[in-house]
Image: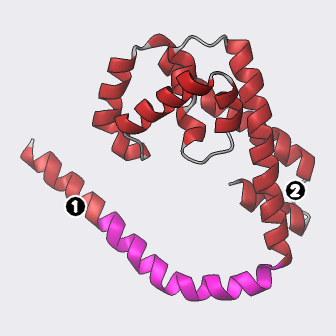
């Protein structure tokens, strides 16, 4: 969403600094449920939950294991650097909670790492805005294929959900 916000900054619809502030707040607040999940549940319960429901959010217990190994190896600095790596960004909060990283320390390192990511994505969206007319031409052609593909995927998941409900 931040690159889209950056595009709106380019258009003059949004203020860059206010967008960064709210993007940062949203990112930090979004990391807290994962941190508390790790803090209040044990690793076995979390892994079991992810095995059952992780597909919905695109993660597996193997991803959780990797993030825990990384956390044990690199410590709290991984909370900062992990915010810069897609896929690790969300999951690094869980081992921080499991390892009982102090909340204030977690929030500080999460905020600092997230600030870099939010500024980068927003600026990237701003720069794309300068080339929007060129990109829009490709996007229009791509939409001809993307819309039917998304419709097929959506239909597949709805059908699968229907079949699953019928078998229960």
Q: Which residues are magenta?
A: 131-155
Residue 164, above or below 142:
above
How many labels were placed on the picture? 2
The answer, for residue 159, to whether it is visible in the render is: yes
Which of the numbered marks, if any, corresponds to residue 94? none
Look at 47% across and 11% down and name the residue there: 40
Quadrant of the drawing holding the C terminus: top left
The crowd level at tag 2 (other Cα within 10 Å; few <14, some 14-19, many 20+) is some
Q: Is residue 117 left or right of residue 140?
A: right
Q: Earlier in the sequence, mark 2 or mark 1?
A: 2
Magenta portion: prevailing SS class: helix
Counting from the top left corner in percent of width and height, residue 126 is at 84, 64
Look at 72% across and 22% down and name the residue there: 107
The answer, for residue 33, to whether it is visible in the render is: no
Q: Is residue 91 left or right of residue 65?
A: right
Counting from the top left corner in percent of width and height, residue 60 is at 37, 40
Tag 2 secondary structure: loop
Dividing the picture into quadrants, the one containing residue 64 is top left
Tag 1 secondary structure: helix
Which residue is tagged 1? 159
Counting from the top left corner in percent of width and height, residue 130 is at 86, 76
Foreground of the two, 8 or 118: 118
Residue 125, above or below 115:
below
Which residue is tagged 2? 14
Q: Is residue 84 left or right of residue 124?
A: left
Asked whether residue 150 is drawn in magenta, I would say yes
Look at 84% across and 68% down and name the residue there: 127
The crowd level at tag 1 (other Cα within 10 Å; few <14, some 14-19, many 20+) is few
Q: Is residue 26 left or right of residue 112?
A: left
Quadrant of the drawing holding the N terminus: bottom right
Look at 84% across and 39% down and name the residue there: 21
């Amino acid at each position: 969403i931040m690159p889209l916000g950056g595009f709106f900054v380019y258009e003059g619809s949004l203020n860059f600094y206010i967008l960064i502030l709210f993007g940062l707040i949203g990112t930090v607040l979004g990391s807290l449920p994962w941190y508390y999940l790790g803090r209040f549940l044990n690793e076995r319960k979390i892994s079991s939950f992810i095995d059952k429901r992780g597909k919905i959010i695109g993660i597996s217990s193997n991803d959780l294991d990797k993030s825990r190994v990384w956390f044990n190896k690199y410590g709290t600095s991984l909370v900062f650097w992990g915010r810069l790596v897609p896929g690790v960004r969300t999951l690094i909060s869980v081992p921080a909670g499991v390892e009982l990283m102090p909340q204030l320390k977690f929030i500080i390192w999460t905020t600092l790492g997230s600030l870099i990511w939010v500024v980068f994505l927003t600026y990237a969206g701003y720069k794309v805005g300068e080339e929007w007319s060129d990109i829009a031409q490709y996007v229009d052609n791509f939409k001809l294929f993307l819309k039917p593909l998304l419709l097929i995927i959506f239909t597949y998941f709805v059908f699968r959900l229907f079949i699953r409900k019928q078998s229960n």
